Image (cartoon, rainbow, N blue to C red):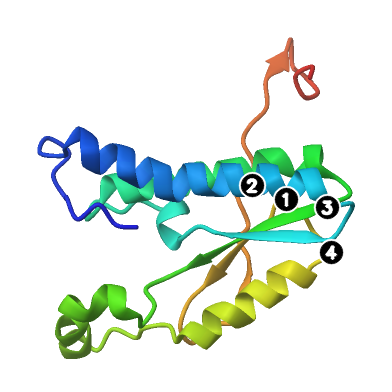
Amino acid sequence: MLTGETDPRKLTDQQYRRALAVNVDGVVFGVRRLAQVMDGGAIVVTASLAGLTAMPSDVIYSLTKHAVVGFVRSVAPLLEPIRINAVCPGIADTAMIDRQRDAFAAAGFPLLRPEEVADAVWLAATSEGSGECWFVQPGREPAPFRFPNLPGPRREGAKVGPPPS
């Protein structure tokens, strides 16, 4: 759900709340319900490439998709034995881009076919991994995105383990 507003100074409260409700609340509440009724298996949610990189053309959309990516990565160990992954497609050839279709065609920008996204969902659902975010781009095989490792804290030159739960 794109907000349609590119200038955050002009973003209305209603646009902001609607984007959060659709893109973040929908995922969180859906996962909560599924986790209550599933004993195993896989959940796949939809994020976006906008959740893996900056997207100045719609900062609130990007914010919500970053939230979905962070949620999936963080909740995965808590849901075991249920696996949860996200698909992060680029721009797909759907009705959402009807007004921009000519611009994409003129620029020679390749669009994803819906079936390519569906194939990626299947790969994410059948993956043995959990907490993965699968990128989906035209002309590339879908695969889990490799997040960079963060430098951990040190204490007098020694490595420190993860923070307590």
Disc 2 residue type (three-letter): Val
Residue 26 vs residue 111, the one in the foreground: 26
Tell me what residue is drawn at x 59 percent, y 42 percent: 29
Residue located beneath label 2 in the image = 72
Q: Does 24 appear above or below 88? A: above
Name the residue beneath numbered marker 1.
Answer: 34
Question: Can residue 148 be seen by looking at this rendering?
Answer: no
- Of badges 4 and 3, nearer the viewer stands 3
Q: Element at badge 2?
A: helix
Give the distance between the C-alpha atoms of the residues marked 1 and 2, in whole angstroms.
14 Å
| Residue 27 image position (x, y, % from top left) | 55, 49
Q: CA distance from mark 4 to mark 2?
A: 15 Å
Whether tag 3 and tag 1 are in contact, CB under 8 A, the answer is yes
Residue beneath disc 4: 128
Q: Is residue 153 visible?
A: yes
The residue under label 3 is 38
Q: Split into 4 quadrants, where in the image is the C terminus? A: top right
Counting residues from the start of the chain, the first of labels 4 and 2 encountered is 2
Judge from the rendering whether residue 43 lies leftward or rightward of residue 128; answer left or right.
left
What is the spatial separation of the Cα atoms under label 4 and label 1, in whole angstroms?
Answer: 19 Å
Judged from the image, the secondary structure of the residue bearing numbered disc 1 is helix
Q: Quadrant of the N terminus?
A: bottom left
Q: Which is nearer the eye, 113 or 34?
A: 34
Q: Amino acid at mark 1?
A: Leu
What kind of residue is marked 4? Glu
